[in-house]
Amino acid sequence: MSGHSKWSTIKHKKGKIDAKRGQIFTKLAKYIAVASREGGSDPEMNAKLKEAIVKAKAANMPNENIDRAVKKGAGELQGSIYEEITYEGYGPGGVAVIVETLTDNKNRTAGDVRHAFDKNGGNLGISGSVGFLFTKKGQIMIEKSESIDEEELMMTALDAGAEDVETSDEGYEISTDPIDFGQVCEALKSAGYELISAEIAMLPSTETELTVPGDAKKMLKMIDMFDDNEDIQEVWHNWTGEEDEQ
């Protein structure tokens, strides 16, 4: 999400995908179906659908699941109609939080989101209350490996349109303009790189530390409540703590 927590966040998400693969695929299928419904079923003509498919493949979602979701969105198969709703609020200690949802029952989802905030020392805000603290960027993560030549990776990414490549002890973080996200992902995959995470992320411009005892635990509990809700697609925040912190 932000700061030094990015790699722990990736591990946290990957662990959840392994433990709850069916639920994760359900969320991804909703996202693909909505993108297909709104912009058409051809990913080359629909940037949002292309991004959704890249994200699904990074999570190892089977191609048949992806194809079925595209067809549902295009109306070729029967499926529910989902509405995109974004909520903004504050977690414990004033952490800025954005919750992106896809729902066929907005009253149910609004109640669930409010409950997760309230139960963990946060509060649901109004639209725009924290959104200005985040910038939308393509974010691609590649784990470090002895087989990767850093200079070659950087040139591949930048030549494809990436804005920046950052290196850490754990791997490489490639950032892009959302418009260039799909083509950068394709270039990296064509060059043989394994993407352990690829998504359009909301990156915070400021960070918040939690210093009051118990606040980090509340923050983790709130994130888990959001992640366990099938209506909730993504949760973005500006907490600098580690998501595997106890």
Image (cartoon, rainbow, N blue to C red):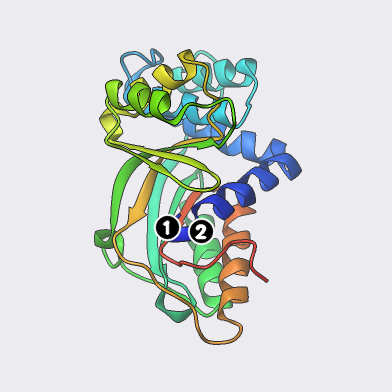
Q: Quadrant of the N terminus?
A: bottom left
Q: Is residue 121 left or right of residue 90?
A: right
Crowd tier of the residue under label 2, counting other residues whose Cα lies within 10 Å: few below 14, some 14–19, many 20 or above: some
Indicate the quadrant where residue 18 lies: top right
The answer to whether residue 127 is seen in the rendering is no
Q: Is residue 120 left or right of residue 163?
A: right
CB under 8 Å between callouts 2 and 1?
Answer: yes
Residue at the extreme right of the image, as rendered: 19
Asked which secondary structure carries label 2, the reply is helix
Give above or below for 52 relative to 23.
above
Give above or below for 1 relative to 60.
below
Amino acid at pointer 1: Ser
Amino acid at pointer 2: Ser
Indicate the quadrant where residue 56 lies: top right
Front residue of 122 and 106: 122
Q: Mark 2 and mark 1: span between their CA atoms?
A: 6 Å
Residue to which mark 2 is pinned:
5
The answer to whether residue 82 is seen in the rendering is yes
For residue 246, the mark is none
Residue 29: image location, x then y, percent:
56, 30
Residue 17: image location, x then y, percent:
67, 41
Identify the residue shown where x is 44% and y is 31%: 150
Residue 46: image location, x then y, percent:
33, 20
Identify the residue shown where x is 55% and y is 23%: 69
Residue to which mark 1 is pinned:
2
